[in-house]
Image (spheres, helix red, strand yellow):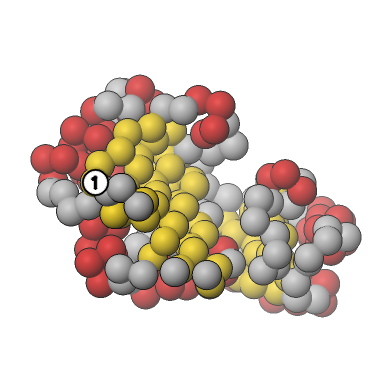
Amino acid sequence: MQIFTEKEAENFLEKEGFQIVNRIYIKKKSDINKSINKISFPFVMKVSGKKIIHKNKVKGIILNIKNYEESVKAFKQLKKIKGFEGVIIQKQIKGKEFLLGIKKTPEFGHVIAFGAGGIHTEKLKDISFRVYPFDNIDAEEMIKEVKAAKELNKKTINKIEQNLIKLNHLIQKYPKIKELDINPLIVNEKEDIIVDARIAWE
């Protein structure tokens, strides 16, 4: 099984037409300055490494970084994490957080998930599932089944629906995808942006 790190997964999804947050990957502290020129404050810094699966569990995500001094401090903190290979710096996005996922099962083949995202996903268990392949009607029903999506307007629902249909096309094009986790997809009035992703291949 091959695992794509967040950096690899996000680059792959961007090529496949998904909206990914503005980001830069750095390996050295001296690269922070060029990042500041490309990504405005506040931003997020995340540890990156092939052996680091759950960044939250190793305190590998630092939010709301507002200046150069905080950036340097965060980089030094992340560098101490076991398995460190580099740091992803991302624009900090505000909005409602959702989970999108694919899992290949022995019983049903590929199953697509949609639910409440963010750090409390496992605790909330507010998720709906559909077996691949499915259409726009199935995608709309999935969204309706999730409590966290109840107050969304039509425009935002349409954005999520489009992302779910893109997952459908992704499975068709890449049947070797074993697992895909997008958490979170952040939606607001202006955009629908993936800020974290991971892919496992057969």
Left or right: residue 134 compared with residue 183: left
Please name the amino acid that badge 1 sits on.
Answer: Val
Question: Can you identify the residue that label 1 sits on?
Answer: 131
Say which of 156 and 99 sits in front.
99
Residue 147 image position (x, y, % from top left): 35, 22
Q: Please say if 156 is above or below 198.
A: above
Q: Please say if 155 is above or below 12.
A: above
Label 1: few (<14), some (14–19) or many (≥20) C-alpha neighbours in 10 Å: some
How many labels sit on residues? Answer: 1
Say which of 82 and 35 sits in front.
82
Name which residue lies at 13% across and 46% down: 136
Residue 53 image position (x, y, % from top left): 65, 56
Say which of 75 and 71 sits in front.
75
Name which residue lies at 28% across and 63% down: 171
SS for dot 1: strand
Residue 134 image position (x, y, % from top left): 16, 49
Rendered image quadrant of residue 175: bottom left
Does residue 192 appear anywhere in the picture? no
Does residue 199 appear anywhere in the picture? yes
Say which of 28 and 131 sits in front.
131
Name which residue lies at 78% across and 66% down: 84
Residue 78 image position (x, y, % from top left): 81, 58
